[in-house]
């Protein structure tokens, strides 16, 4: 329903999922709510959803990564750096935290760190095109 633009149906499905989920899946549901919120342009809802996912599962690296991206957009660069670093430690097999950390390092002029991080991202996922 998300790709069809039926966002009201998506949110209703998530509401039911939250009522039926167990502790092992609640963070994933909040992460997906955050993804839908990004898709509809509601960064505040996305921010709250990723924070909620992390509060339910402090090891949810994908939520840390997306929270970091939102923090960059808000101008909270130190918080974003911390979110990316947390994701990198929690999930060293994911390329996204390293890639976004490289973009942040480039943005603040730390080109040596940017180079190292993008190199790590490409080692994990050599087909990455950005």
Image (cartoon, rainbow, N blue to C red):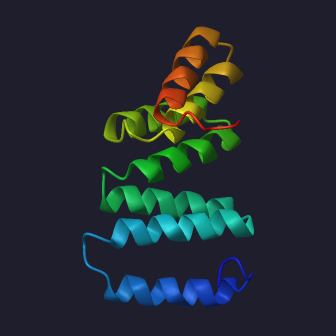
Q: Position of residue 43 (x, y in %)?
A: 67, 59
Which residue sits at x=34%, y=58%?
Answer: 55
106 to 14, vertically: above or below:
above
Q: What x and y, as percent, mark residue 123?
A: 48, 27
- Of residues 65 and 50, the one nearer the viewer is 65
Furthest residue toward left: 23
Identity of the residue drawn at 65% across and 28% down: 103
Residue placed farthest to the front in the image?
A: 127
Residue 109 placement, left or right of 52:
right
Which quarter shows the C terminus? top right
Within the image, what quadrant is residue 26 found in? bottom left
Q: Position of residue 51 (x, y in %)?
A: 45, 56
Q: Nearer the viewer, residue 83 or 61?
A: 61
In the rendered image, the quadrant that contains the N terminus is: bottom right
Residue at point 31% right, 82% down? 21
Rendered position, 69 above or below 30? above
31 or 44, nearer to the observer = 31
> In the picture provided, is 24 more to the left or to the right than 70?
left
Does residue 120 sit above or below 61 in this rendering?
above
On screen, residue 78 above or below 36: above
| Residue 93 percent location from the top left of the image | 38, 39
Which of the two residues, 53 or 100, is positioned nearer the viewer here? 100
């Amino acid at each position: 329903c998300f790709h069809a633009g039926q966002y009201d149906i998506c949110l209703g499905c998530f509401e039911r999922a939250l009522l039926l989920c167990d502790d092992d899946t609640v963070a994933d549901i909040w992460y997906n709510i955050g993804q839908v919120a990004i898709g509809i342009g509601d960064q505040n809802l996305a921010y709250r959803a990723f924070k909620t996912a992390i509060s339910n599962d402090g090891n949810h690296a994908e939520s840390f990564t997306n929270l970091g991206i939102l923090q960059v957009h808000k101008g909270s660069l130190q918080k974003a750096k911390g979110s990316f670093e947390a994701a990198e430690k929690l999930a060293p097999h994911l390329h996204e935290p390293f890639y976004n950390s490289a973009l942040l390092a480039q943005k603040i002029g730390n080109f040596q760190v940017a180079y190292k991080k993008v190199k790590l991202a490409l080692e994990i996922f050599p087909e990455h095109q950005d």
